[in-house]
Amino acid sequence: METVISTASIQQTNPAAGGQNRLILSMILQQNVATMSNFSICNLSGFQHTNGESIYVSVNSPLFLTSYWMEPHCLFFSNGEPIAAQAYSYQIAFSVRNAHVANQGSDMLIFSYNSITVPLTIISEDVLGVPNGSIPGKVVIPALIFTSISQSSALANTSNT
């Protein structure tokens, strides 16, 4: 079988526990994709969704896609119309909710098209000050760093240290 997807990568936009997040899948197609083709991204941990829950999806092109969450830890989507092969990348964003507990994310995600596994590059960059925060499913619990400031004199027009 010939390769349909030449390159694919994924990243997330927010690693904060309990926060709204977006998974951004980028893919370049070498061939057209027929209507009602099935795609899945599996081994996604660190998200808070129920089996069969619809997932909001947006695309940088006028495509009609439907997506839903499927246990254990998979995001499924399919196209309601043919998808044309093109030289630039399709950017598909899925709106997801992060879990309320810390999670390291997964670098072992499985992306498939009509049950054929497709190589998927996981983008690993700092996000919102979190090292490797772009790894899908990485969740951190925000913590504040407290510091104290004091002065030696409360009197006006005096020198303070």
Image (cartoon, rainbow, N blue to C red):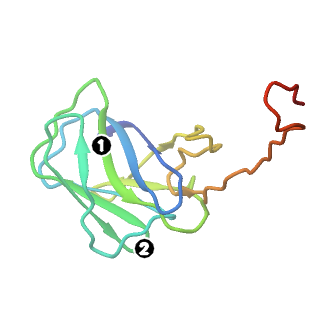
**Secondary element at image label 1:** strand
Which residue occupies the foreground of this view, 136 or 39?
Answer: 136
- For the C terminus, which image quadrant? top right
Q: Is residue 19 left or right of residue 127?
A: left
What's the residue at 82%, 34% (across, down)? 155
Q: Is residue 103 left or right of residue 35?
A: right
Q: Position of residue 16 (x, y in %)?
A: 53, 55
Please tell me which residue lies in front, 79 or 104: 104
- Say which mark, if any, is on residue 40: none
148 on left or right of 48: right
Using the rendered view, name the quadrant where residue 62 is placed: top left
Q: Residue at x 54, y 48 (%)?
A: 135
Q: Which residue type carries mark 2?
A: Pro
Q: How many marks?
A: 2
Name the residue beneath numbered marker 2.
72
Where residue 28 appears, as percent x and y from the top left, is: 32, 33
Q: Nearer the viewer, residue 139 or 92?
A: 139
Where residue 37 appears, x then y in whole percent? 19, 54
- Which residue ends up furthest to the front in the rendered image? 156
Residue 116 position within the rendered picture, expressed as x and y whole percent measured from the top left: 35, 54
Q: Which residue is mark 1?
A: 92
* Residues packed near mark 1 inside 10 Å, few (<14), some (14 to 19) or many (20 plus): some
Is residue 77 in view? yes
Give me the residue at 51% from left, 57% from top: 137
